[in-house]
Image (spheres, helix red, strand yellow):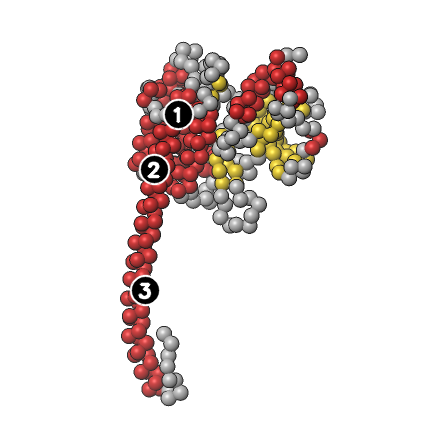
Amino acid sequence: MSKGTEWITNAINNQYIQQYEYSEFKNITKFEEGRFAHVKYADWPCSGRKVAIKELKSYDVQKLVEEVKIHCSSHSSKHVVRFFGLTKAPSNNRYMMIMEYADLRSLRNFLSKEHVNISWQTRYKLSLDIAKGLYCLHSRNIAHCDLHTSNIVIKRTNAETTCCHSEFIAQITDFGGAISMKENVTGDSEDVGQYTFTDPKILNGLGKYKKDLRSDIYSLGVIFWEISSGKIPFKSYKPETNDSHRDLCLTLAIINGLRETPTCSTPKNYIELYKTCWEYEPSKRPMIEKIIETLETLKRTYRKDLNNNSNVLVKNLGELDNNDNKLGQRKGVKRFAEVSFKSQESKKVKV
């Protein structure tokens, strides 16, 4: 028995984690693939919920154990996808993870819907949700190391109600590349991931610079840009060249300081925030606590400005109504005289 398998067996026997029979899950459908895993969705009748079933592409029980440990340590945050337990695939007897189901899929999918007009109040909420999820990890000295908009999911929180206005929450998921800084695990620095979200220090010195908490902050800055623009980073960069040449050119350009251009509708303070996150030097990037503090201030200011503008609008509309009433009263008197003259039966006209 391997060390990883032994850990899982002891964790199940000591009820640290739960194991469920695969037969408990119904209507299993393959949904999507990540870099490290296949994800299926299923009904779980005994719990009355839908779940995601995650199966590693390249089965490594020790990697599975590390991911389970990170999920268990992050269980307290609603901004991290919840881990329910393990099950075994009947075909190969390998462990699979039972995860919380996010019905609105990835953040990238959510942002790309053309018929949805996303307000800045919503954009600030998304940004804060993600930052709070990352704070949960960083406060436990865990670096995600593969943070991008496809590894953040959106879940409706009022899905069972008939309310026409959906409420939702953003959650961080997929800890296949995550590392625990406490255990001095350095991770695989050669595994870049989505390079448009990857710390340029890593792109510039593979094997020399190790991924850490500050690498996540850089990725977060790019995520904030995508939230503000609704676009995929650098999608329009050299579209005429082939993929491998384009990727090489873009990687070198990012190392040399290329960053995405802010959209004109983005608040200035939000731009300043994500620009500090994607600084080349890690020491110049803010800590996650500072990012949350800044976002909460921006959200409060936006709401205050919105309320002030609404009050001004209501006041102006009230003045217009008063003017209309005065005008209407004058017209009513004239109309009353005309009607009285034409018909003695009409004693009064309501205007």
Q: Is residue 71 left or right of residue 132?
A: right
Q: Earlier in the sequence, mark 2 or mark 1?
A: 1
Q: Which residue is mark 3?
A: 321
Q: Is residue 96 visible?
A: no
Marks 3 and 1, Cα distance to the nearest angstrom? Answer: 51 Å
Q: Which residue is mark 1?
A: 217
Frontmost residue, 116 versus 171 = 171
Amino acid type at circle 2 is Thr
Q: Which residue is mark 2?
A: 297
Amino acid type at circle 1 is Ile
Residue 235: image location, x then y, percent: 41, 30
Residue 59: image location, x then y, percent: 61, 18
Residue 58 lies in what quarter of the image?
A: top right
From this view, report whether residue 316 is shown above or below residue 338: above
Q: Residue furthest front?
A: 14
Q: Residues within 10 Å of mark 1 (few under 14, many from 20)?
A: many
From this view, report whether residue 21 is shown above or below residue 6: below
* Residue for point 37% across, 37% down: 296
Label 2: which secondary element: helix
Q: Residues within 10 Å of mark 2 (few under 14, many from 20)?
A: few
Marks 2 and 1, Cα distance to the nearest angstrom? Answer: 19 Å
Residue 209 lies in what quarter of the image?
A: top left
Label 1: which secondary element: helix
Label 3: which secondary element: helix
Query: In front: mark 2 or mark 1?
Result: 2
